[in-house]
Image (cartoon, grey):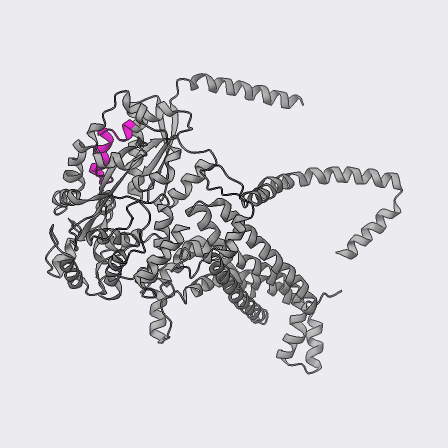
Amino acid sequence: MSVQAQRLGAQVAGVPRTRRRRAFRAEGRAAFWFLLPSLLGFLAFLLFPLVASLALSFTNWQLLNQPKFLGLANYIRLFTVDPSFWRALTNTVFYTAEYLVLNLVLAVGMAVWISSLRWGKRLFRLIFFLPTFTPMIGASLVWVLIFTPGGLMDWVVQSLGLPIPNLLVDPAWAMQAIVIVSLWSGFGYNLLLFGAALESIPQTYLDAAQIDGATAWQRFWRIKLPLISPTLFFGTVMTAITALQVFDQVYSMTRGGPGAATATLGFFIYQNGFTTYRMGYASSIAWVMFLIIMGLTAFQFRLQRKWVHYDD
Amino acid sequence: MKTLTTILTVAAAAVSLSAAPARAEPVTLTWQMWAGTDAEIAAWKHAAELVNAQNPDIRIELQTAPWRDYWTKLPTLAASNTLPDIVSVQSLRLANFATLFEPLDDYVKQGFDLGQFDKSILEGLSYDGHLYALPYDFGPWIVYYNRDLFAKYKVEPPKAGWTRDDFVATAKALTQDGHYGFAVTATDWLEFALSDGAKYLTEDGALNFADPDLQAAFQSYVDLVTKEKVAPVIAASGQPSGDIARGRFLAGNVAMYVAGPWEMINIRKSSNFPVGLAPLPAGKAGSITLSAGSGFGINKVGPHKDLAWKAIQVLTGPEAEQYLASQGRAFPARIAQQGSWYDVAAQGVANARETIDYALKTAQPYRTTANWNTVSELLEQYAPLAFGGSQSGAEVLNTVQSLAAE
């Protein structure tokens, strides 16, 4: 990318200055018109609501009343008074950690396995990618039927004699139901991503390593993994962001229950905004969530220096 | 540029052409109503058509949302200034939303006869001394039972005067072959608690869930699942527990469940077994149930308030009431039409008239706190902990009390 930009610069530098400026102006105008629709969309549907929600987070707006300015009261209440917030935060962190690790392990493992197949690579990728474009709400309803007390899941667990209670009844296990459904729907995307990265590794590297006597295990850890690490990094960041925002599964499968066992930050925002009608408070939670996600992503970018290899 | 001018001219002509006959066209009023099943939506569509038949100058555009979503949608519509002309409201939730409604007192004074309606539901749809909606239905929570299951296991059907002990014994006798005697929900224990003499609100109308008597009453309801094992567990779910209970009853998996007379439409359309009704079993304080109802009001800031008043008179008028009653969608708020519910909707249902009469004698109006939507959602979320045996009834109610009080 950077190489292309430099070349472009060199080419442009060769042209006389006046012509260059005119060309830039014409191109700039065209670019402006092409970008305008998405810019307007960005302003109307992203920037404006963002600013509005920030403003609302300092008020006590409850949909039906006139909002009153409260200063930092919402944020103070969030961190010092409301036990539900800490519960939701803990749930979200727990979910994200478990889901992220399982998703990456599963996606990398399956991608390596599929890339080693002689035939059927495309078929398997398609099959595992299908859930990614299945609507979450519909899929969740089917999963609820599987998890429901006395349902398929209970039957399987009983037949195998596993000591697992019903996932939707036992608060200690309820989050596992959310993790399973999220994995089912989410890992196919990473699988496709990592699969493509694995395909792009030059076969010569692997052949050379094999001639030098590297085992399959060594080839995976020393060659494949470092070479796909930029893609792995991208997958990790995106998966972490979506995991922290988890909502659909919770909304359609448990509504945060039983008790507060599956109440995540995303659901907590919905609950405050739309069942207790505290929009101001819900906005302040949303902003705290935004800052958490931003902080975590920044942290991941710092960490990437330690483990991501760019092939320059 | 020339083409643009042409387009504009043609467009302007088209607008003026379509605007001319528009004056003779009826005014379209929007109406928001909750409806959970196809049968319910069909019933409300028919009611909307009645308005147009009696007032050719009004056409009703019906918009429906499932019960739970309705209460999410309503304040959102109000906040974005897109509230419909006709707004439906339930007596339990009027306190939450009274500010959205036009008081009907002035309209009524122009010569509308409220004497035709049941008094308790007129009170239920009033707030601070003003009437905010005309009622279409009301009714007590009662026990629906599956007569086939009673016959199959040779159990005596319940009738007025039965006690809690009779109820538990009956439910036990019916719990066989994967069937259950009863279906619990997150909120119907309130009727059982009332029958035990416990109070869910304080004298000042505040939530009273920390009260030991109320907690004991809730625990005895929870015991039906955990100790007596006569009712299936309610798990965490995206569906309201009332819908789950109804689904289990309609599928023939449970023999008894508690609901209001407005459920008769779904029972009639979706059950393939004969049904009977019985009042709530008597607890320590007798058989005391709750009664509630719903009605239609006028959007306070709507542009067609007078037309909306005309429309809600039809929607709650004798013809609409007779239709809704015979469909089983409503036990009519108009006393004269109540016969249609008994004779048509509840035709073949055992003890329908006796049960409703008996229940209404002691029923209490469903009084609520102003944040009742929050309370009922919290119960939906936390009650499964008690049914699943992870927490005691007292722990659950203490949590709900503290979270709702905030």
Residue pictured at 25% horizontal, 60% vertical:
B216
Position of residue A26 measured from the top left corner of the image (x, y, whole percent) = 78, 37
Residue B52 visible from this viewpoint: no
Any magenta on residue B124? no
Q: Which residues are magenta?
A: B313-332
Residue pictured at 23% horizontal, 65% vertical:
B229
Which secondary structure dominates the residues rendered in magenta? helix
Residue B191 visible from this viewpoint: yes
Give the vertical position of B219 relative to B314 (above or below).
below
Q: Quadrant of the C terminus of chain A?
A: bottom right
The residue nearer to you, when weighing A106 against A276, is A276
Residue pictured at 24% horizontal, 66% vertical:
B227
Q: Is residue B64 left or right of residue A203?
A: left
Q: Residue furthest top?
A: B20
Position of residue B135 measured from the top left corner of the image (x, y, whole percent) = 27, 34
Q: Is residue B375 left or right of residue A234?
A: left
Residue pictured at 24% horizontal, 29% vertical:
B317
Position of residue B198 measured from the top left corner of the image (x, y, whole percent) = 23, 53
Q: Quadrant of the N terminus of chain A?
A: bottom right
> How many labels were placed on the picture?
0
Q: Is residue B57 left or right of residue B229?
A: right
Any magenta on residue B319? yes
The residue nearer to you, when weighing B308 against B350, is B308
Q: Residue furthest front?
A: B203
Give the vertical position of A161 relative to B255 (above or below).
below
Position of residue A93 measured from the top left corner of the image (x, y, whole percent) = 52, 63
